[in-house]
Image (cartoon, helix red, strand yellow):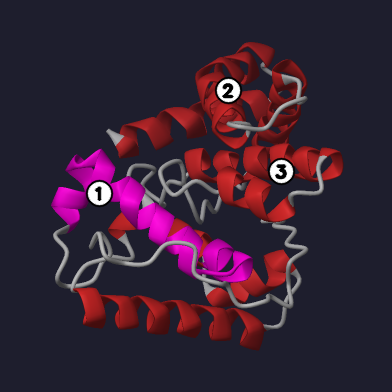
Amino acid sequence: MSAANQELDLELLWRARQGQEPAKDDLVRKYLPMVRHIVQTTTVGIHGLEFEDLTQEGLFGLIDAIRQYDVERPGVKFSSFAYLCIIRKVYNSLRSQSSGKHRLLNQALSLYSVMDREGCRPVVDFIQGDSVNPETVVEDKWTGMRVEQVLRDYLSVLEYVVTVLLRQGYTTSEISRAMGLNLKAVDNARTRVKAKLRRILRKYGSLTHPEIPRKMRKREDLYLKVKVSL
């Protein structure tokens, strides 16, 4: 299913690059639900933001993806690339309208929304310990929500973003370039994430254990102004 979806996207992209507007329109119609979903999930609990304005920003991101995607050497599937481009546009718009960068970033990079290279696996499937059954996590929405909450409680903004992008299939080198950070900062963030999750698993046996404390004081991050430009 995923491979067939990518093949269809590539065909439409080739036709769009040749100036066939109907192909471009087909791509926009196909990914409009993704744009709306991203806007809906990023604006939950945030008042004073115009849904249609943000949807328009998301569509600009989708158009960027259609123009910029490398159809000759696709490193990731177009669906994943489009998702990142849309999120970047929407997040930058949110950032310009609100000072709540931490909250907005966490909402924008929802662990349930982010897709991997195959466009089908949530990030919670990537960060489970051996004591947690990944199939159960995927099937049980509550479990996934609990894992996401633990990550948001225990990871800094940088650590959270690095985790999401690693799950997308990007390397630490690609992430460092995209975020404008040195490679050591990204490697250190990844190391801290692994250490934190290991400590939780060692103590509680699962990332969904009900006795895991909420609202841990996060490490003050040196890289709070995150600008993802993949």
Q: Quadrant of the C terminus?
A: bottom right
The crowding category of the residue bearing disc 1, from other C-alpha atoms within 10 Å (few below 14, some 14 to 19, many at least 20), is: some
Q: 141 left or right of 34?
A: left
Q: Which residue is mark 1?
A: 143
The answer to which quarter of the image holds residue 128 is: bottom left
Label located before the other in sequence (3 or 1): 3
Q: Please tell me whether residue 88 belongs to the stretch shown in magenta.
A: no
**Residue nearest the viewer, comparing 88 with 194:** 194
**Residue nearest the viewer, comparing 216 with 76:** 216
Residue 178 on image: x %, y %: 69, 64
Amino acid type at mark 1:
Thr
The answer to which quarter of the image holds residue 131 is: bottom left
Q: Please tell me whether residue 144 belongs to the stretch shown in magenta.
A: yes
Magenta span of residues = 134-162
- Can residue 124 be seen from the camera position used here? yes
Q: What's the CA distance linking mark 2 and mark 3? A: 14 Å
Q: Residue at x 30, y 48 (%)?
A: 144
The crowding category of the residue bearing disc 2, from other C-alpha atoms within 10 Å (few below 14, some 14 to 19, many at least 20), is: some
Amino acid type at mark 3:
Tyr
- Can residue 169 be seen from the camera position used here? no
Q: 72 left or right of 144?
A: right
